[in-house]
Amino acid sequence: RILALADCRMQEDETLRSLASPSSLQGPELHGWRPPVDCVRANELCAAESNCSSRYRTLRQCLAGRDRNTMLANKECQAALEVLQESPLYDCRCKRGMKKELQCLQIYWSIHLGLTEGEEFYEASPYEPVTSRLSDIFRLASIFSGTGADPVVSAKSNHCLDAAKACNLNDNCKKLRSSYISICNREISPTERCNRRKCHKALRQFFDRVPSEFTYRMLFCSCQDLACAERRRQTILPSCSYEDKEKPNCLDLRGVCRTDHLCRSRLADFHANCRASHHTATGCPADNYQACLGSYAGMIGFDMTPNYVDSSPTGIVVSPWCNCRGSGNMEEECEKFLRDFTENLCLRNAIQAFGNGTDVNVSPKGPSFQATQAPRVEKTPSLPDDLSDSTSLGTSVITTCTSVQEQGLKANSSKELSMCFTELTTNIIPGSNKVIKPNSGPSRARPSAALTVLSVLMLKLAL
């Protein structure tokens, strides 16, 4: 195993040398595939190769205090950039919450800021793509915000209060939540309500270090009344972390955010994962609700901190603390930036999906179960702990049932709703495999009844 690791390291170093050399900029394999590596490791590989490390030092000097056009006017700077574009540094990414996250992001932007042509509206995310899904969180937390419960009881429940209670039962969640509440509520002076910088830091620690099965419950809990929705809005202590005396211009706020590598990265990640898509069923890139919600939570504790704009239990609208007054000829761009929060279809659907305890069905199209398969005796309309989005029977049926229960929709003749009401109204006779459907019509008569009628007819014919 040691020999294999040594051989792998030698191959990596050899790849770096070939990519960092001037000759690598020629030939048909100029943009050949390279395995991704985090930016801290990519920097170590570059430092081990003299040509790459010298070009990287040159580029950092070129970027210091210069705009892109000035930098590219210098041939030495341009040559350094061209070489580094073909090194592992160009393809490197970071992991949110990694041990050296800030260092990783600094390395990433030291390369990519030299590649952008001016101020881009959407920037590529420096983070690795998210592959987990909401159903993974549901399985871990065993929470479904009223799914499968009595609709009357569910309507009276304050799911945001339940989320706070669940947090207090977990030592890590309780400790970090108590910490940010204490810091964000601590008044500095009669004119200064709190120390926002320390409040933001405490919030970042909470959302980065506490598992999402706890933090999501508090941020995205479903509400039926104003009291619940107000508790949801108050989750991040908005009087300190969010609100201010005046609202700045959104583009100015974005500009401030982009001067900080962490804030810039979280904003870019939000746009990458929550940007509304017209090519997916959910309105989210790759139909991944989890990626969007994670990116949203990742912005809390920075200048671009978003929050619910009011205490409406049903109308979900979120926004940073900014507006577009004073935008001048940039008003259209400002309004577009703000709409990515206030009118974001992907984000709204993701929040509602989490609150309802549902996730998009990512299984292949077509029936994923046998049509004649009867429900198992232990199945109930509520989701079991071990149900994931890959379960053959449950997800598409339960998702529809949940939507019907939560939203109070009437049944129609669609296939999914038929399956839903089959799941909800089907009874299993204890101790047998017989299925009784109370509302079945003549065409759904039970086999035993049909056999009885047939026997009587045969007896009469015989007589």
Image (cartoon, rainbow, N blue to C red):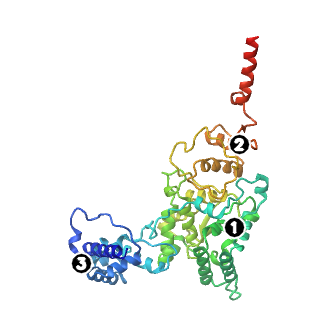
Looking at the picture, tell me which residue is in the foreground, 295 or 436: 436
Q: Position of 278 compared to 222: left or right?
A: left
Q: Quadrant of residue 454?
A: top right
Which label belongs to residue 205?
Answer: none
Mark 2 or mark 3, which is nearer the start of the sequence? 3
Label 2: state its secondary structure: loop
Which residue appears at 57% of the width and 64% of the height?
A: 293
Could you tell me the amino acid type at mark 2? Answer: Lys
Label 3 – label 1 distance at C-alpha: 55 Å
| Residue 133 sits above or below residue 450 on the image | below
Could you tell me the amino acid type at mark 3? Answer: Lys
Q: Position of residue 99 (x, y in %)?
A: 50, 79
Mark 1 or mark 2, which is nearer the start of the sequence? 1
Can you say which quadrant of the picture contains the N terminus? bottom left
Label 3: state its secondary structure: helix
Q: Position of residue 264 (x, y in %)?
A: 48, 74
Q: Which residue is mark 3?
A: 75
| Residue 380 sits above or below residue 156 on the image | above
Q: Which residue is mark 2?
A: 410
Residue 445 visible: no
Q: Mark 3 touching mark 2, by CB under 8 A? A: no
Which residue appears at 70% of the width and 29% of the height?
A: 447
Furthest-bottom residue in this view? 189
